[in-house]
Amino acid sequence: MDSNDLVYLLKNNPYKTKNIYEGKIITSTSALHINFLKNSGYKYKIHDTKRKYLKKIDVLRVDGSLVATVLNPNYPTNALIGRELTNDKIKTERHLRRFNIGTPNSRLYNDNDIDIAYEESFAETKKNIVIKPLASSLGRGVRVNVSQKRFKHNWSLAVNDIKEKDKRIVVQNYLEGFEARATVINGQLLSIIVRIPPYVIGDGQNTISELIDLKNKDRMKCSYLSGMLIKKSERIEEFLLSHGLDSNYIPDQNEPVLLNSVSNVAQGGELMDITNIVTDEIKEKALNALAAIPGVLTGGLDIMMKSFDDSDPKIIEINTYPVFSIPTYPTYGQGKNTAKEYFQSLIAIDQLVHNPDYKYNIKNEEDYIRAYVSFMERKNKLLKSYKHNLEDIIFK
């Protein structure tokens, strides 16, 4: 994402005010699960695991028999084969392209392959690229829109940010546009949320550094954003430097200044719900991408688009255990009760498949069933369109 994308989003933001979530709120996906079930009237059991923070949730039928078990990072409606595929970014890209779904073009390197990566990245083009650790989360170590001149410096910074045992680095072509997270729950597209990187708006008086302080004070008013302030980091200084700025620059009145091109609310970004703004073409691309993954009904898809009516959005990544707080607490727009949607659809599907003697009365049960059946038809149609052996798709 660059400054032009920020201007586009601010100009086309249909919401006049920011959401302020007051008091103590629940943010972890597992806690959102449990909180919903406690107030739902559905039967369930919670079991401790060897990890104190990790809970196993058994969802039960009216008669007490087991519907399914939810245990982070696995949803029972997602098969192992699909989870393993999406855990490998390179395989996922190759797989999606077989179904004419656009993705970045990625190469994988060991952390000490800096010279090889440099040569291969700029052998045929001098365009900017993306550097990111293979196993990172929350945008840690990700460097976006990196020029040839700054490649080796940013590579070293990315490697130093890796906390995981897996030290491998992915290098991708830089895709223009902004990133959104599409959340699909058991075949239903629940939301599409733009993740706006951290930015400030000039007032003609304060420096960028001072504007960050003022914005952090504003974020402290929101329970969801208060723990995710904009940190004055080397990453921001590097990004500003690459655009001919520094933290002492004084932006003009109403001048937007992007501080980082990595789209992550945890690093000081914001969330905008665009579910009802984007075209059906973008929604179809998200549904087709997840449907192409064998055995997967629920996921979070990172989509790069140039506008709300982009005819060729790209799928960057697929997560089979998506962060539920993103669609629950958007900065702009109406939040979704994602845990409710998951468990009610899970139970509705179970009641369709197993037809138990005693059933829960689920509001909009037919909508959940309709979404599930439609998604399964979409999945079968896509997989049948590939004329080769399914094992060839996954393992080669």
Image (cartoon, helix red, strand yellow):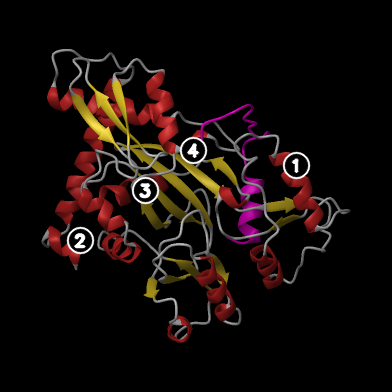
275 vs 157, nearest the viewer: 157
Callout 1: SS: helix
328 vs 76, nearest the viewer: 76
Which of the two discs, 2 and 1, labels the residue nearer the N terminus? 1
Farthest residue to the left: give it: 389
Image location of residue 237, percent across then percent down: 70, 66
- Residue 390: mark in rendering: none
What residue did someone put label 4 on?
325
- Residue 217: mark in rendering: 1
Residue 168 sits in which quadrant? bottom left
What residue did someone put label 3 on?
286
The relative height of residue 321 versus residue 40 in the rendered view (above or below) is below
Q: Which mark is in front, 2 or 1?
A: 1
Image location of residue 151, percent across then percent down: 56, 78
Which of the two discs, 3 and 4, labels the residue nearer the N terminus? 3
Pick the quarter of the image with the N terminus. bottom right
The relative height of residue 14 versus residue 355 in the rendered view (above or below) is below
The residue sitting at 17% across, 22% down in the picture is 65
Q: Could you give the CA–CA distance between mark 3 and mark 4, rounded to whole angstroms?
A: 19 Å
Farthest residue to the right: give it: 205
Q: Main secondary structure of the magenta part?
A: loop
Which of the two discs, 4 and 2, labels the residue nearer the N terminus? 4
